[in-house]
Each structure stands twice: as C-alpha cells, then as structure tokens.
Amino acid sequence: MRKLILVTYLLSGSGVLACDLKVDSAWIREAPSTAKALAGYALLSNVGSKPVNVVSSSSSAFAKVEMHETVTENGIAKMRPIEKLEIPAKGKVEFAPSGKHFMLLEPKAALKNGNVVSVSLKDATGCQTTVQFKVGAGASQSAETMDQSKMDHSKMDHSMHH
Ligand SMILES: [Cu+2]
C-alpha cells in the first residue's frame, strides 16, 4: 500500500499529463479463436471540466480498433462507426452490450478468458489513456444476462470492415 502511494506521488510530481478520460470495468467478450472481430465494453468517464472528445483507439493486440454503436432499424440490429465520441464535462458514457462497443478487429493471437489486453484511447488534445481490458464473460453477471437475450455479437455481419 505504501509503495502504491509513492508511485502515484512520483507520477503526479514528474509532469506526466493525466488525461481527463478515465475508464472503468473494461472487458472483452470471449469469442472462438477463429473470430475476426471481438467486442469490448467499458465505462468511460470525463473527470474534467471541459468536454472530452475521444477520436481514436488502438491496441498492439489487434490490427485495428474502432468505436461502434448498435442501432436498430426495422427490427434489425446494425453497427455503425463512431467517428468522434464526445463525453460532456463530468459526464459518463457507457459502452455496453447492445449499444456502443469497441470493435477489436483481427486479433494477432487467440485470446482466452482471463487474458488482459491494453487498448489506448486518444482524445482530441492528443492525450492518451491506456486501458486494460480483461477477456471474459462480462463485467458483471447482469451485463452478461442482458446481452445474451438480445444479440449475439459473434454472429453479426462484419463485412463492412473489408
Ligand atoms: Cu461493431
């Protein structure tokens, strides 16, 4: 515990710029090793007093990371890319099953339950937040139940990416 406090002190004292974007409960849905795209979810918070615009996402574990949102048109769930995600001052945006998600394309290695993957999110000022996503069945039991009743992401059409 004492060590953790010291590290925090050193980081904040050494001029490292802390982003206003904070990310919690980040997880990636486990998928078959043949899956070409995985879905990631998290709770994004803006702890600052100005809006934060998330403009890009990337990970060394994937060829490409996109932000998507799911919209339902005529009863059919479709995904579309989010070019720029605005989080209001002191606001939160939830990426959750059946809604917004990170689309993690072409994993460089098969990911299993319990693996942890770093994803970096960059805001419009260039500030980069690195988030640890844990591969698993869900952030909580309720999230898992909610998703499976509505949509199976692994069966969705990702042809738009090619
Ligand atoms: Cu998607």
Image (cartoon, rainbow, N blue to C red):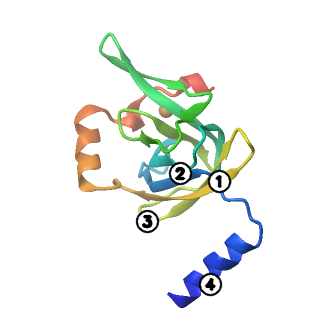
Q: CA distance from mark 3 to mark 2?
A: 29 Å
Choose the circle earlier in sequence order: 3 or 1: 1
Q: Nearer the viewer, mark 3 or mark 2?
A: 2
Name the residue tied to disc 3: 114
Mark 3 residue crowding within 10 angstroms, few (<14) / some (14–19) / many (20+) = some
Q: Nearer the viewer, mark 3 or mark 4?
A: 4
Residue 140, given in percent of the width and then of the height, sits at 29, 56
Would you say 17 lies left or right of 24 here? right
Badge 1 crowding class, 10 Å Cα cut-off, few under 14, some 14 to 19, many 20 or more, is some
Check disc 2 and give the amino acid type: Val
Q: How many labels were placed on the picture?
A: 4
Task: Say few, some or many: other residues with alpha carbon within 10 Å of mark 2 (under 14 / 14 to 19 / 20 or more).
Answer: some
Cα separation, mark 3 vs mark 4, equals 29 Å
Reading the image, the residue beneath label 2 is: 47
Is residue 118 positioned above or below 142 on the image?
below
Where residue 68 appears, as percent x and y from the top left, is 51, 31
Q: Looking at the picture, which amino acid does disc 4 mark?
A: Leu
Q: Residue 78 falls in which quadrant of the image? A: top left
Q: Earlier in the sequence, mark 3 or mark 2?
A: 2
Do tag 3 and tag 4 residues touch (Cβ < 8 Å)? Answer: no
Residue placed under numbered mark 1 in the picture: 19
